[in-house]
Structure formats: C-alpha cells, structure tokens
Amino acid sequence: MPGKTHVQTTINGEKVDFLCEPRQSLLECLRDVIGLTGTKEGCNDGNCGACTINMDGRVVTSCLVLGVEAEGANIETIEGVADGSNLHPLQLAFLENAALQCGICTPGFIVSSKALLEQNPDPTEHEIRFWLANNLCRCTGYDKIVRAVQDAAKKMQEA
Amino acid sequence: MTTADYERNMILSNVDYKVLGTRPVRHDGADKVTGRAIYGADFDASGLLHGKILRSPHAHAKIVSIDTSKAEALEGVKAVATAADFPQTDDKKWVRDNILASDKVLYAGHAIAGVAAANPHVAEEALALIEVKYEVLKPVLTTQEAMADGAPILHEGLTTQELGEDSGVVSNTADHFQHVKGDVTKGFEDADVIVEREYNTAMVHQGYIEPHNGTALWNADGRLHVWCSTQGSFVVRDSLAELLDIPVSRIRVTPTEIGGGFGGKIPIYVEPVAAILSKKTGTPVKIVMSRKDTFEGSGPTPGSNIKIKLGAKSDGTITAAHAWMAMEAGGYPGSPVGAAAQCVFAAYDIENGLIDGYDVVVNKPKTAPYRAPGAPNAAFGMEQAMNELAIKLNMDPIDLRLKNVAVEGTRRIDGPTFRRIGAKEVLEAMKDHPHYQTAKAAGHGRGVSIGFWFNIGFDSACNIAVNSDGSINLTEGSTDIGGSRTSIAMHAAEVLGIPVEDVRPSVVDTDTIGFTAVTGGSRTTFATGWAAYEAAQDVKKQSIERAGSIWDVDPDSLQMEDGVISSKTDSELKMTFKELASQMSDTGGGITGRASVNPKGVGGSFAGNMVDVSVDDETGKVTIERFTCVQDVGKAIHPSYVEGQMQGGSVQGIGWALNEEYFMNDQGNMANSSLLDYRMPTSLDLPMIDTVIVEVANPGHPFGVRGVGEANIVPPTPAIANAVSDATGNIMTQLPLTPGAVLDSGK
C-alpha cells in the first residue's frame, strides 16, 4: 500500500491537516478522511457538480482534484456557507423558493451560486443558467433554482 | 401577450383550506442546505469496510468458472462474495441472479462478485484479481431482434405466457397479453380516416444524481441492520428476507436521506451483497456504486417498439384504436408494458379498442420503474398519432382530444371505469392558456399532448404523539424524496387546526413504524398523507374525549376547530389544544394517535403539455423555446412542491425526447455510461417551465388528493415530437430526437 502524504490546508476558515494517499481525490479526503460529508459524490468524473467546492477563489469539482494538491489551499465547502446558525441568503432563498427536492445536488448548487453572486451580484437569467450548467439537478427542472438565485441576488443587493 | 404579462404558475382551484395550499418551508430544509442531511453514502459506522462489485464485460455469456483465490489473498481484502453464498432456494433464482449472476450473465454490467476491503481502492484492486471464464454468446439488443425467428435465447427455461396460458414455447417473449373492447374490425370499417404508424424509443435511465448505496451490519446476535438510500425500506427488508432466507423480524432497514429515485431505487442491488460480506466479516460493509455501475448495473426504463392505428369519423369521433407494444424487459422478464397498456388510450372514450402487449427479454440491464413506467413510451406513439389524425381531419389538436375525451363513467379499453377525472379540465385549461392563445413565433413549431398515470394506493402507517406544548411528533415510513414530510405533516396540521410548524415529521426505520409501501406510484402524499389524516383524527377524537372528562360533559356535545375545543351548547367551555396538551399528564396521560391505511380510492392524474420549439435547419438541433405543463392534481397540498414535480417531470421528459439514450455497440456494451455522454438537460438547455395546477378533487381522498409525481413525464416526448413535426413537416418516429435523427427524418 502506498505511503501517505501530510497535507496542510485551511477549510472553512480553520487550519486542517490530513493524511492522504496520492490516489485519493480531494472529494474522498473531505468526506472519508476529514468527515465533511456535505460535499456529495454523484459521478466522480467531473460531470455532475455535486462535489463542487471553492478552492482559492475558484469553483472546482473536488472529485477532479487530488488530495495532495490541496496543500496550502484555502477551501470553502457547503459546511462553511452559513454564518454560524444564520443561513446565507442563498440557503434561505433555496428553502423559500422550494429549489430543492431530494437535495443531493443542493450543496453544489449553493457553493456554485455563491461564487457567481460574488463575481456578478446582479446576473441575468441567462448568466445564471450558463454559470450553473456545470451542476446537474434531476428533480427540479432548474426553474425554481434559477428563481432562488435571482431572489437571493435581489435580497443581497437590498441588504 | 408575452410570458411576462401573466402569472407563470397558476392554480385553478375552488376549495379553500387553512393549511393545505400554503407553501411552508420544508421541515428538513436547514439540514439539506447546510450539508448536514445524511444520505446513504454519508453513513459511517465503527470498523466500516468498503465493498466493490465485479461486473461482466459481456452482454450475453455463460459463466464457466469464477476463481476468487487471488483476490482473497490480497492484503487488506476481508471477504469475497459470489452467487454461491446465497441460500440456494428453489424459487427466486432470477431475482438472486440479478444481484450476483450464478451461471449466466445477461447484460454488460451484470454483477458477478463482491469484495470487502479496508478501503475502496483495495477492494477495486481485488476485483481485477478475480478470474472469470466466460463462454461468450451472441447478444440480442432490441425487441425486434429478440422476437425474430432463430434469435439467441436468453433463458432456456422461459416459455411465453400467451394470453394468460403457458404456451410451452421457449422464447424471449415472456408474456403476450391483450385487452379488447367492442369490435375493432367493425370500428375501423366505420372510419372515414385511418392513421397507422410504427414508433421506436430508446432505453433511458432515471438519472438520479446519487448512485445506489447500502451499508449492512450482520450483527453477532444474528440480526441484520441495513442503512441505504431506498424508495421503500420495507421493500428492502422483505426482499432481503427472501434472498437471504431469514425472517423479516431479524432485519431492520433504516432509510437514509435519498438523492433521487424516480422508481429506480425501488429494487435492491448492493444491499444483499453488503449483507453477505458483513456476515462473512462480522463488521459493517458499505457499497456505493460508481456512476458507470449505476448506468450499467441498475434498472433503466425500456426501449420499445410501438405500433398505433386509429380510425375516426370525419367529425373527429374515434371509431377504433389498436396499440401493439413490445417493451424491453432487460435480462429478466418484467417490463412495464402492462402499465403502458393501462395508459395508452386512457385519455379517450373509445368504443372499439385492442391493445397487444409483449414483455421481451433482451441483453440489457433488467428494467426498473421510471416515473409512470411505460406510459411515456406509449404516449410517444399514441399522441403523435392523434396529431396526425388532427392534421388529416383539419381539426385543432386540442379540439380533437376534447371531442373524444374520457370523463367520469368512461370505460377504459383495459377494463376499469373512471370515477371523477380531470382530463377534460386539463384540455380546457390548455386551450384557455395564454401560451395557446398566443400565436407561435415565426419559424417555431408548436405541439400539444396529454398523458395519464393511474397512481396507486397500498399500505401506509402513521403515528402521532402529542407534546406538552401542543406540538406533535409525527412518524411515518415513506422515504422523502421531494418534500413529502411536509405535505404529510400538512394533512395532520389541517385536521388539528394547528400551524404546520408545530408538526415535527420524521421518516423512521422498519422497526419503528407499521408497514408502509414504497415512495412510488405517486402514492406518498395520497396514502401516507391519508394515514396522517386518520392519525390526526384519532388525536382529535381523544382530545375531545379528554376535554369531556375534564369538564365532566358528554364528548358528543364538544367540537374541535382551529385548534380550539369547545362546547356546542355552553359558550363558557373552551380550551385550546395547547392548553389541553399541557394538562395531559394530570388528566390521564399522554395522547397518541395512530393509523394504518390501504386506501382504494386512488384517483388517476392527467397532464398536458404545450411546447414551442425551434429547429436549426443546418444541424437539426432542437431548442425548447416555451414549455407549459398543465396537470390535474386533485388537491395541491404544497403547491410549490407540486409545481416542482410538474417541472421536474417535464424536464425529464425533455431529456428523454431530445438527448437521452443507452447508446449500445453491437456487442451490447454501453458507449455513453457517464454523465458527460449520457446527456441529461442542464440549466442552459431550458427555459422556465410554466405550470397550471388544475384541481378536480379526487372523490376517493378526504382532501381530494390524486398524486402528482408521474403523469407529468408522459406528455413531453410526443408534445415535443409534434412540435418538431410542425416545424419541419416531418413525422418523428423514433426517440431521442437527436440532431442527426431530426435531419434524417426529412430523408
């Protein structure tokens, strides 16, 4: 069995060290080594977006990043989106707009949408659809997800 | 009128309730937007081992031998399981063989062996060390190939059931059945116009984002505990009991949160293998399918070959209809062709009809339910034939449907007579809708269609415990895939006159609730909602009795409305449910309500679509420009989640129509078993999906609920095909309508 590498990262604002095998994806490290299971696996080949995280300011599918590549990285996962017990406006908007059914894709959509609104606080419907095209949802048909992002954008601008 | 000028999601309702019809935030919402909800793959247990499954590379082969010795010797491997580890009971061989093949593989991806190891990577390495010798056979991949004379036979022991009797003929056709009404020959003779055409649809997958998973612990006390993402914890329990030949009393199944199912998570796949591996190791074993496993080793919905013939008078009255439908069962018998037969002509009152159904085994994965199983395939043919008929008769396509529409009292060709249904109301709502009232844009095509799903009842149970603060804990056994905890809780809140926030609903395990059938068949809000209604009635009755004993009056003189218990005769006697709850302990103890139901008053649901498309002349690419879904739901308990079902079903139908298919090579290997190549719709492929909720109350439910999950996937494929035909002038006879297929349709 291959030896393990010591990786030092910051996850959701906290210093986190972990050991991983060279063949382990960052997704696997987050879920099985560190215990942050909010990031989901839907395909393990970068096509569904369920494992979307923010890494050094970029939205990435964590199944396509190796754990060892996270050395020194600043990572935000779904567990870091809420401010303590105060939900992020996107999380509230997803609930109020019924933008989830089964919920397995929801962490990825929220992490991805948050990055969009940070770059573009007032996106058009087309810009939202284009940005979120990397995240698959099979339950909602996307209508209520797009509306939730529009709603959150409006509320965040008003705030 | 532009789409901005009208309400995009409308509700046509005439009944008001206090809680029903409102849009509360779902009770499990916070867990699901913060990543805290525990889905099957998130489950952990001390000493957990990880399992992987070896799958056949061949679509059709005899298994000559399986040698697992090298895999077992690999460091880190704890156990290997094969079909030989199952109790070899006489029956259930096919069910067992679909979990782990014993003597033959019937599709590429067919499971052969399972390995448990310290981590998933070691388990995967071990799979490569298992040596399987195959005698490869020629595969049959379509119903046409499978039904041809001299076709390779999948099962030597399979003989055709011909019209209910065993023909004794060994064949790939497991079953041929017929429904007959009236005199079809005469009906066609009486027709002024006849349309007749053959249609083909491809095998498609439900496409849930969460792969199949299951963790099993075969404990030292001989009890088996399974945690998994399933649509029916009791189905898992009972299937495991049969396969492992142990009593249900020794099995406990805890349903985790589930990441989509659409019917595909009704059957079991990895759970029995995890159980056997846990029995061998004495530790919990978790198996999670990869995406490729999920495509190749779970249960998609069949491709089909369908012929529709319709005859009509010149005024549009249908005089005769014949449907001939053959569906791919996959490796073992059991396609949804029977359900398709119940739906194909259901929207219409037809005097003379004939339906032939064929269940045909082919070398593809054993099919499983997918949202209104069989009905979209049937509608793809029937609703295009209706379109062709409307063109021949020079009639408006909605008017032609209204001319023949099924209503209360109509007898379906397959037998049942409809109670109150909303097919007519759906068609009328379509005709009145701004979408239909507005001319299509230049160059666009427009299509309409209607579809039916019958919905089911079956068993559901619910318990309610009243808390001292007047809130209630509601426990039930229906896995919540799309917000059903809340819709079920709303039933109880309505009965008791309390806010839905005062109801705490939980989905519990098979040791903790009475038998509850699957989350499927659009039954959950209908049947488990009904159980919650009855359990709340039980609480209400006991609350009134308790108040009667406190006040020392006859309970019959009391009533409970809007959460207040009061006397019908003495205005002094009044107490809120909360006040009563605070006194429970001192006045006789806690109040608990319970109910088990098996409701028979199932109400079928009709859904209609209007769709505008544009077609790129050069590439053949179809773009959905506008899409409206109209559905009779009986009563929308939580309208947002009802709209969500309508939008989700519509978009699955759009994917089925335009992109999705199992693309097989001639050896039966799936060439597109990833979510890149199996092309499900993305947000960028779609417009907003407009909805119209029609509420024609189901007389068979206390609140008129019909069930909403499935009918909405039935009309999209023909509506889109009709729209593409309108745009191109060519009839679409096969799915999916890929750019190539659309270009070829003109040749």
Image (tube, coloured by chain):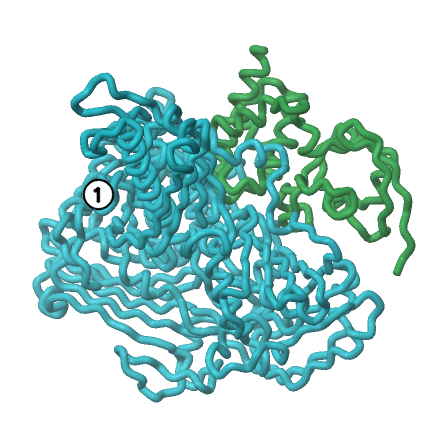
- Amino acid on which disc 1 is placed: Gly
> As rendered, which of B353 and B148 lies closer to the eye?
B353
> Could you tell whether B462 is left or right of B128 in the image?
left
Residue located 78% across and 68% down the image: B77
In the image, is residue B583 above or below residue B610? above
Residue B288 appearing in the image: yes
Q: Quadrant of the image for the N terminus of chain B? A: top left
> Along the line of sight, which residue is nearer the eye, B72 or A5?
B72
> Residue B572: which quarter of the image?
top left
**What residue is rendered at 17% in x and 44% in y?**
B402
The percent position of residue B131, horizontal first and vertical second, equals 73, 78
Residue ID for mark 1 = B422
User: Relative to residue B420, is residue A77 drawn left or right?
Assistant: right
Percent of width and height locating residue B54: 67, 69
Q: Which chain is green?
A: A
Q: In terms of secondary structure, where does tag 1 sit?
A: loop
Q: Colour of chain B?
A: cyan
Q: Position of residue B82 (x, y in %)?
A: 65, 76
Residue B566 location, x and y as percent?
A: 25, 24
Residue found at x 31% / y 26%: B18
Disc 1 chain ID = B
Task: Tell me the quadrant of the picture where the C terminus of chain B can be found.
Answer: bottom left
Q: Is residue B202 visible?
A: no
Choose between B127 and B698: the one closer to the eye. B698
Single out the residue that lies furthest toward the top. A158
Residue extending farthest bottom: B168
Q: Residue sitting at 83 percent across and 71 percent down?
A: B74
